[in-house]
C-alpha cells in the first residue's frame, strides 16, 4: 500500500491525515527530483573550477571549447538549473545578474 492509498482509506474514515499528506508530498517530490543524466552535464560539472562564478555565457564558451557546437544560452541555463536542482551548485542572484558556484566552494 502506498501513501496515496493510505490517505484515501483514512479520508473515507474521516481520520486526520496531516502527517500522511506530508509523507505523500515527500514521496512525490522525491520521485520528481531531477538527476544529472547527461554526459555533457557531468563533464561541465567536472570542468567547473571552485570559486569561479558560472553564468550562462561562461557555460556557452565552455561548450564551444569542449566541442559542443551549436548549443546556446538556453541549453546553458538548462544545464545549470539541472546541476542546481541535483544539489551540485548554489544559485546566487544579485541585481541583474544570476550566477552559480559549486557547492564545495567556500
Image (cartoon, rainbow, N blue to C red):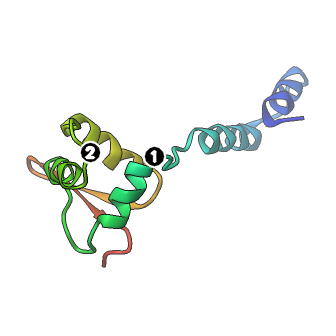
The foreground one among 12 and 43 is 43
Q: Number of labelled discs?
A: 2
Give the residue pinned by disc 2: 68
Snapshot quadrant of residue 69: top left
Residue 90: x percent and y percent? 33, 60
- Which mark is drawn over residue 38? 1
Q: Residues within 10 Å of mark 1 (few under 14, many from 20)?
A: few
Nearer the observer, 27 or 86: 86
Quadrant for the N terminus in the image? top right
Q: Residues within 10 Å of mark 2 (few under 14, many from 20)?
A: few
Horizontal arrangement in the rendering, residue 1 relative to residue 100 (left or right): right
Residue in the picture at 37% in, 68% down: 103
User: Label 1 vs label 2: CA separation?
Assistant: 13 Å
Whether residue 96 is visible here, answered yes or no, is yes
- Looking at the image, residue 40 lies above or below residue 104: above
Instruction: Choose top left, top right, bottom left or bottom right for residue 2.
Output: top right
x and y percent of residue 60 in the render? 18, 47
Q: Which of disc 2 and disc 1 is earlier in sequence?
A: 1
Helix, strand or loop under label 1: loop
Amino acid at each position: 500500500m502506498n501513501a496515496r492509498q493510505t490517505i484515501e482509506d483514512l479520508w473515507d474514515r474521516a481520520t486526520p491525515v496531516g502527517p500522511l499528506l506530508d509523507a505523500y508530498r515527500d514521496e512525490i517530490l522525491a520521485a520528481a527530483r531531477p538527476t544529472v543524466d547527461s554526459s555533457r552535464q557531468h563533464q561541465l560539472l567536472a570542468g567547473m573550477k571552485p570559486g569561479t562564478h558560472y553564468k550562462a555565457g561562461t557555460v556557452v564558451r565552455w561548450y564551444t571549447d569542449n566541442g559542443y557546437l551549436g548549443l546556446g544560452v538556453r541549453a546553458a541555463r538548462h544545464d545549470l538549473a539541472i546541476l542546481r536542482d541535483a544539489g551540485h551548485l548554489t544559485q546566487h542572484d544579485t541585481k541583474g545578474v544570476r550566477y552559480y558556484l559549486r557547492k564545495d566552494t567556500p
